[in-house]
Amino acid sequence: MDDDPSRYARLPEKGGCRRACALHFAMLGFTLVLAIIWIIRNRAWELEITVEWPW
């Protein structure tokens, strides 16, 4: 077992960035799907948003 703490900061030689990018894109896609479901279920297009400026 390699207990070197700096090993967590290093990417593997092959496919590390590609795998990490795919993971981040998958999480982003999942978040977007959840956002779309929330918008549809709560009819977010009917919400009124009021912005009050402090001046």
Image: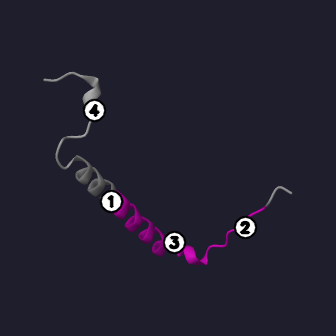
Q: Are marks 3 and 4 in contact (CB under 8 Å)?
A: no
Are discs 4 and 1 less than 8 Å apart at CB?
A: no
Query: Which residue in the protein does label 4 denote?
Result: 8
Q: Image quadrant of residue 54?
A: bottom right
Question: To which residue does mark 3 refer?
Answer: 42
- Neighbours of disc 3 within 10 Å: few (<14), some (14-19), many (20+): few
The region drawn magenta spans 27-52
The residues tagged by marks 3 and 4 sit, at their Cα atoms, a distance apart of 41 Å
> How many angstroms separate mark 4 from mark 1 (CA)?
21 Å
Q: Earlier in the sequence, mark 3 or mark 2?
A: 3
Give the CA separation, mark 1 to mark 2. Answer: 33 Å
Q: Is residue 42 left or right of residue 53?
A: left
The reply to whether the C-beta atoms of the residues labelled 1 and 3 are less than 8 Å apart is: no
Disc 1 marks which residue?
25
Reply above or below: 25 against 48.
Answer: above
Residue at 27% x, 57% y: name it.
Answer: 22
For residue 12, which numbered disc appears in the image? none
Viewer-side label of 4, 2 = 4
Q: Is residue 8 magenta?
A: no
Residue type pointed to by label 1: Phe
Residue 23 picture location, percent across and down: 28, 54
Q: CA distance from mark 4 to mark 2?
A: 45 Å
* Mark linked to residue 50: 2
Q: CA distance from mark 1 to mark 3?
A: 26 Å
Give the alpha-carbon distance from disc 3 to disc 2, as whole Å: 18 Å
Depth order, front residue of 49/23: 23
Q: Secondary structure at mark 3?
A: loop
Can you tell which of label 1 and label 3 is closer to the viewer? 1
